[in-house]
Amino acid sequence: MAKKTNPFALAQAQFDHVAEQMNLDPSVRQILRWPLREFRFQIPVRMDDGSIQVFFGFRVQHNDSRGPCKGGIRFAANETIDTVRALATWMTWKCAVADIPLGGGKGGVVVDPATLSTGEKERLCRGWVDQMWRNIGPRMDVPAPDVGTNAQMMGWMMDEYSKLVGEYTPGVITGKPLGSGGSQGRTEATGFGVIVTVREAMKHLRMDSRGTTAAIQGFGNVAQWAAIHFIEMLGGKVVSVSCWDRHDRTAYTFTKEEGIDPYYLQKITDIYGTIDKDQAVRAGYTVEDGDAWLTKDVDVLIPAAIEDVLTEETAPKVSDRVKIIAEGANGPSTLEADEVFKQRGIFVIPDFLCNAGGVTCSYFEQVQNDMNYYWPREEVLTKLDAKMTNAFKGVLEMAREHDLYMRDAAYWVAIRRVETAMRLRGWI
Ligand code: NAD
């Protein structure tokens, strides 16, 4: 079993590498290497059997020079402060690269949400807000959903915050349900944005998107919509998706060479992103081991599940046919994997550029909350397409100008924007 990379060590190593390359001012470097603020707290929850269970919660605010911190809340059994720090740091770069006026934050709770009843989940969500409400807010720090959390949970959190501050405050949190301050298009925004960046990468590489093939890791929110838009926007074919099987406690890859049907698979996938194996087999899918997706002979690989999957060990198994790796997940590739991709000339769309569609749509949601006026889905997706396309082009231009790997170029763009904001505010 390969040693797991500490995600915050990875985030800092990526930053150090680029800070060196850019010859970044040492004071800027000191500020940006670590989060500005960290909160760790207990959340006592009354369980259905009457007992009290204590959960551990986090919120990390990495940088707010460009605007209020922004970032999701993860409910995961293996959540750690370092995972949250890394994700908060990547949120700073993500908001900056997408050029939205927000900073970076992230939160979490150490819990497997699948073990909780609906009532226990609601009390845990409200408990998280009870601990954090003084330090979040539409002008301070705006949470959102992430792995293990969903729109309903955001609705409960918004309600708890509104009760505590004494007024309806939809802008405190994004990813809310439609009809309760949510935005059209938010559910599909991240997967949609991933495919916009793939489309732009294909134009740059002079590939005809029609008939191209992809394999995807995961079948949760990001992966499902990436699969749908890969097929519908690009005219491509997705041959494999994978998922974590909660019951067998292992990962599987589901393959159909003639192309998966994402709408059918959605129907047999639970809310945690586990595909029903038996039904999939009956529908003609081949079930392979969890890593099989990354060895497929396809044009595009889309890791869209978890971090630390493309490593020194797995990166060499990527097929020679792969031209693009679109990082839908946060932190899927290690530094060693990057070296393999650089040597092989694979075009990598780095995570905080590739999956910025979610936070960009969250920003649109906040804007709509502020105006109390809501846009139709088409308008949201058109605006999102424009933002993602511009973000991609900005990074590509930086890469060309300085002959940089795309991840490094994305860091250059983001760090320069954050540095400028800090200078203009007189922090340095
Ligand atoms: P999700 O919980 O909806 O889905 C996660 C999926 O990954 C599930 O299908 C699960 O079965 C699968 N998975 C877990 N472990 C796996 C493994 N070992 N092998 C194969 N599959 C596995 O989560 P999501 O919202 O789709 O997020 C996925 C990734 O995208 C995360 O890294 C998240 O931080 C990132 N992200 C999400 C958003 C968003 O808007 N949801 C935005 C930006 C980035």
Image: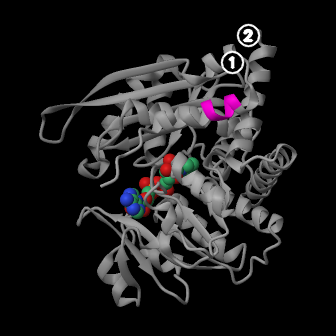
Instruction: Name the amino acid, label 1.
Output: Val
Instruction: Say what secondary structure mark 1 lies in.
Output: helix
Classed neighbour count for the residue bearing mark 1: other residues with Cα under 10 Å, few (<14), some (14–19), many (≥20):
some
- Number of the label disc, if any, that sits on residue 28: 1
* Residues tagged 2 and 1 counted as in contact (Cβ below 8 A): yes
Which one is nearer the viewer's eye here, 306 or 411? Answer: 411
From the viewer's perspective, tell me whether residue 388 is left or right of residue 348.
Answer: right
At a point 44% along the width and 22% down the height, the residue shown is 132
Classed neighbour count for the residue bearing mark 2: other residues with Cα under 10 Å, few (<14), some (14–19), many (≥20):
few
Residue 227: percent from left, percent from top: 58, 70
From the viewer's perspective, tell me whether residue 338 is left or right of residue 370.
Answer: left
At a point 81% along the width and 51% down the height, the residue shown is 396
Q: Which residue is mark 2?
A: 428
Query: Magenta part of the protein: which range?
Result: 16-20
In magenta segment, residue 212 = no
When the figure is inspected, residue 321 is found, relative to residue 423, above or below; the finding is below
**Residue 177 in view of the camera:** no
